[in-house]
Amino acid sequence: MKSALFIFTAILSFFAMMPAGAQEAYPSRPIRLLMPFGAGGTVDIMTRPLAAKLHEQLKRPVIVDNRPSAGGVLAAELAANATPDGYTLFLASSSALFVAPAYYKKVNYDPIKDFAPISLIAQQPLLIVANTSLPFRDVKGLIAYAKERPGKLNYGTVGLGSTNHFTAELLSHAAGIKMVLVPYKSGAQGVAAAIGGEVELVFTQPNTGLPHVKAGRVNAIATTGVKRHPLYPDVGTLVEAGYEDLAITGYYTVVGPAKLPRPIVQRLNSEIRRAMESPGVGDVLRNQGTEPVTSTPEELATLMKQETARWQRAAKLTGIKEK
């Protein structure tokens, strides 16, 4: 009898010491998806169908928590410091996950050590658009125009230290030209500035620039894709223009805090991949010039290492660093 009582007491003690999340099936409560951009923006718009689909599949709310900040650093830091229980996730852009640590003097997270890779969800090149009054329509014309007017060609991007900012400076370095940066708070503001003639060029995302290209308000000069984009096949690439190292893709991923339990990572990866295959999610992205694409956690881990190293090299090459 004493032996049985001892065993029963030991079992109770074991369960008492287990974390609450380990005693219940995951997920048992709402999941917070941190978003490094403001509500109503293009990335926010494409994320909400994913959150809604995951809600449907997991039977638990997936709440998009918008935490915009320079470089997406705030959302990244919140995610890195969150409890690794699967209830705080981070929809990480390339700018927040890879570029910000290369640009800012100090960020309180390491893109490799502080996050658990879950799945890639989308990728897209950048799009270079220009005011319609400019005489060029391609990269060759852009470079020639800039060389004739050193330091006089203005370009807009989303903030300092973004993928867009780095791409413009990498092109300047490779082509031997000098352009003047004019940072904006959003891609929409930058494109509006190009339409109005406040700046000549804007390095932006397709989902921001393409509607204005189709409407004839700006001209598409080039894309940074490895190959031409199916939504705008008449627009050439920087690679075609001879800048093979400037095949630049912006990635959107879902990651969690480091030490996220493997079963939770696998469950989330499976559910995200399933959600991305649904027309209600994938078609929203495609219509904005963004390619839905998923991965295994291991594939994403490899990509994260490659991209982190790439943007560290870009920072050294261009000399771009927070002052």
Image (cartoon, rainbow, N blue to C red):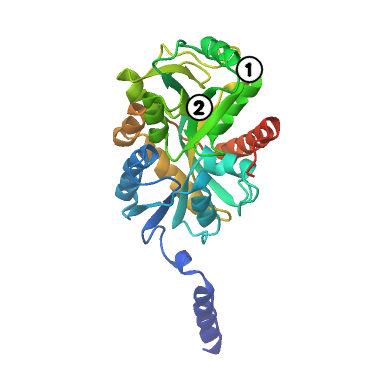
When asked about the image quadrant of residue 248, the answer is top right
Quick one: SS at disc 2?
strand
Q: Is residue 294 left or right of residue 165?
A: left
Which residue position holds label 2?
A: 155
Residue at position x 53%, y 74% in the image = 17
Q: Is residue 44 left or right of residue 100?
A: left
**Amino acid of disc 1:** Ala
**Nearer the N terminus, badge 1 or badge 2?**
2
- Where 315 falls versus 216 (above or below)? below
Question: Number of callouts in the render?
Answer: 2
Which residue position holds label 1?
A: 175
Q: CA distance from mark 1 to mark 2?
A: 15 Å
- Where 285 falls versus 59 (above or below)? above
Q: Is residue 55 left or right of residue 241?
A: left
| Structural crowding at the residue carrying mark 1, measured as other residues with C-alpha within 10 Å and reported as few (<14), some (14–19) or many (≥20) | some
Instruction: Work out whether residue 59 or residue 113 is closer to the camera in this orientation and state it.
Output: 113
Q: Mark 1 or mark 2: which is in front?
A: 2
Location of residue 164 in the rendering, given as x and y in whole percent from the top left corner: 52, 31
**Amino acid of disc 2:** Tyr
Quick one: SS at disc 1?
helix
Location of residue 306 in the rendering, given as x and y in whole percent from the top left corner: 63, 34
